[in-house]
Every structure is written in structure tokens, then in C-alpha cells.
Amino acid sequence: MVNQICPNDHTPDAFSDAFKKLKIGNLMRKSNITKSCGISAYEVFHFLLLLAFQGKNLFRFLNSKHKDQAVSKNTYYRFLNETSYNWSKFLLLLAVKVTTTFDTLTRPARVKVLILDDSVIKRNRSKSVELLARIYDHVEHKCQKGFTLLTLGWSDGYSFIPTGFNMLSSANKSNRYNEVSSQIDHRTNGYKLRKESMMHKTDAAVLLIRNALKAGIKADYVLMDTWFTAEPMLADILETGMDAIGMVKQLKQRYTYKDKKYKLPELKKFVSFEGAGNIFGSLVVTTKTEIPVKIVFVRNRNKKSECLYILSTDISLSDAEIVRIYGNRWSIECFFKASKSFLKLGTEFQSHNYGAMVSHTTIVFTRYIILEWIRRNQNDQKTYGELFFLFCEDIQDMDLSSALQSLMALFVEHISSLSADITSLLKSKVNEWMVSQASFIVNGKY
């Protein structure tokens, strides 16, 4: 639908191929994303998905020389504003399909994780945006007008796939500039998303994790930053059947070690820092509600006089393994950076409708998933299927029969240069050795 930027740009073809393999149209129908008249919802979605790769926004494209390949602006905005579409279900179904495929490309013992984090979507120049709220930006350490994009993603250490999100407003009514539009039908999916946007952040996070596990996402641990790594959150995650690993900072919490309660800095005296590398050591302690956790003390490279604390509810893991697994959390930071800088998250459409922002965010996340799908198929040779396994057979170690044949050929070639008496003696010894071997070797069936 969207023209190529240049003759060598195969983005539309690559995306169209991914659409077919992932059966995007079928996933849209399961999520009630359909349109009964005029242009199909599939075509509108396909157009909006590729729009970011054209170097133009919707307004510029509709006023360019390619405008005959698009429909009216109102068609696209009606699509984005539609309240009956279940965008959360669509994104989750797509994530399940992709992660299930990626699972087959790695060994079963490989650790998979769910990563939880949030980012701020600023709307400082807006006034009448639905559910617009006053939120705190932990990066700039000041309040902003906008939304908190709470995101849950899956990673196997190579690929990151967003599985769900919640465009949070504020649970406190005094922090909300606007409320839900009175024109929204309370029976629709759009209204349910608006109600969820007013949940507390921790409750919304646990809901995202439960929905992902219920849909079939397979993971071993939940990774979190310091904001989420608190005792109530740990208890909620353990109830889902998963373990949590997160960075923890000192607030007012105390941990029990050898029947005494200590703050985090006080626990450092039980760890030896002399001659240690980047990992100083660890302690197994219990929280206030008797949750056993392992705290790993790691060197703070930015301030060597201090250390960082990584907490794990799985105390059987080694210190190095806890640090290695927690390193996967950085992939969600890269995801946020790529989505905002290159995929136009939060900037492509400036709608006053909350549902349009959810639709736009889902489209951006779908762009990232398909790009990751294409990257994995290009770089991971196991995606070749049976052809990969045939290649593997060609590079197998030498089998027994080939090894014996090569060894005997080399031996015969060597003894041919010796004197007749020595050659005769060696041959008789070789014959005795051959007779003493197993029957399948003597009979030449190897």
C-alpha cells in the first residue's frame, strides 16, 4: 500500500511477508478489529504500520504525490478511536505467537524472563486530552503532564518482545485534569482500558504479568528496577508461581539475618570486600513477612565507594547467575529508546482521544515486534528449519568407522616403508589385535 522510499528499500515487502507468516489478519479478527464496510481494517492497519518508515506523518502523506494510495484522514482516525477493538488482546496474541516461535530456536534450559518497567509519555502542551494526568518523571525528577506507559516484555537474552502495556493516568482523582468521556459506552473494550488506566501502578503491573502467563507466555523470572522491587510486589509475583529479580534500594525496610534485623548498608559488614571483583558476595536473608531472598552485593562503577544490591527470590541461583540474568533488564530500556526515537512513540498522532493513544501505542509495539521477527529470521540460522539441521550434520565430528579407516590407512602407509621382517611382525600383531576386538568390528560392520 505504501510506496517504497527508494528502489532498494524492501521494507514493505519484508513487512508483508511477516504479516502473512504471523497471520496478522487472523489475530485482528480474534481481537474484534474488523470493519464491515469500505476499506478493510487490515488495510488501514497495514498502512498505519508502515507510515513511520516513509519519513512523513499522516498529514504530510495525505498531501504528497502518493495521496491517491490512501483514503481520507477521517477513516484513519475513526479506526484509531474505535472503542470495540480489543488492542490488548491483539498485542498479547501476537506476542504469544512470536515468543512461542522463538522458544523453539533455543535450548529448553535457556532462561527466559519477563521485564517490567515504565516510561513517561509527555503531553505538556495539552489541555483537553482524555484522562490527562499530572505524573512524576523519575528521570527528570519533576512532575509532567501526560501518561505513564507501564510495559511488560519478554526476553530470551537475544530478542525483546513487548507483551502488554497500560497507558496509566492517575489513581488519584486530584491528579487527573480530565475524566473519561461521557460518550464512551461502558460495555466496550475501550471503556475497560480506561478503567484500568486509573489503577495503581503495582496492581496494573501484576495484572499484566497474570494476563501474560494466562495467555501462554513462558518465562522463569520477572525482572524489575528499584521502584517495583518492594516486599508487597514480591509477594504478588510469588503468588503467580514465578520468581523475581530486581535492584533494591534502601528505604525503611529491614532484613532478618541470623535472628537480627539489619538495614541494607548494615548487611555490608558481613561481606568481605578485600580482593573482590565486581561481585563482592551475597547473603540469604528474610523480609518482614518471612520471604527468603538472596541479596547480591555488586560494585557500583559510577561510585566505587558504594555498592549496588540485587535481590532474588530464587536463593538457589549463584551470585554470578543472578547478575547475569538481571543484565537482561537493559533490553527494555533499549526498547523504549528505539520506540521513541525511531518508531514515533507518543509523537505520531496527537489525538485528544484516550483510545487513539492506546491504538497508536499498539501499532508502535507491533512495528517493533515485526522488526525483531525480521532481525531474528535474518540472523538466527536455526530459522532455516530442516536445512539448518542438514548443515549441522555436515559438521559433525568424525564417526567410528571413518576414524578406524583413516587410522589403518595411515598405519599401512607408514609400515610400507619399513623392512620386510619388521613389516611382517607388525602385520601379525595387528591381526592379533583385530581378532581380539568386538565381533561387529571383526566382521567389518562398523
Image (cartoon, grey):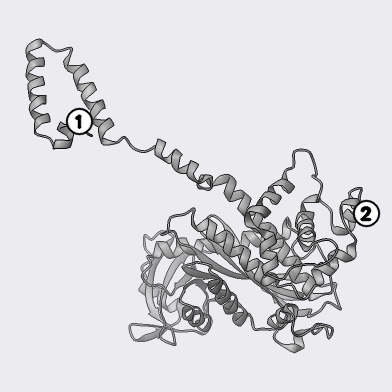
Q: Is residue 117 above or below residue 15?
A: below
**Rendered residue at 63%/70% (across/down):** 164
Amino acid type of the residue tagged 2 in the rendering = Asn
User: Where's residue 160, x and y in %?
Assistant: 58, 59
Q: Earlier in the sequence, mark 2 or mark 1?
A: 2
Q: Residue furthest front?
A: 36
- Comparing labels 2 and 1, the label whose residue is closer to the camera: 1
Amino acid type of the residue tagged 1 in the rendering = Gly
Q: Secondary structure at mark 2?
A: loop
**Rendered residue at 45%/81% (across/down):** 263
User: Where's residue 198, x and y in %?
Assistant: 70, 83
Residue carrying label 2: 63
Q: Is residue 391 above or below residue 177?
A: above
Residue carrying label 1: 444
Residue 4 figure quarter: top right
Picture mark count: 2
User: Where's residue 299, x and y in %?
Assistant: 47, 63
User: Where's residue 49, x and y in %?
Assistant: 75, 57
For this view, does 272 lie left or right of residue 365?
left
Residue 136 figure quarter: bottom right
Q: Is residue 424 above or below residue 110?
A: above
Residue 196 visible in the current orientation: yes
* Disc number placed over residue 333 in the picture, else none: none
Residue 338 visible in the current orientation: no
For this view, does 325 lie left or right of residue 442?
right
Q: CA distance from mark 2 to mark 1?
A: 79 Å
**Rendered residue at 68%/54% (across/down):** 19
Q: Nearer the viewer, residue 262 or 10?
A: 10
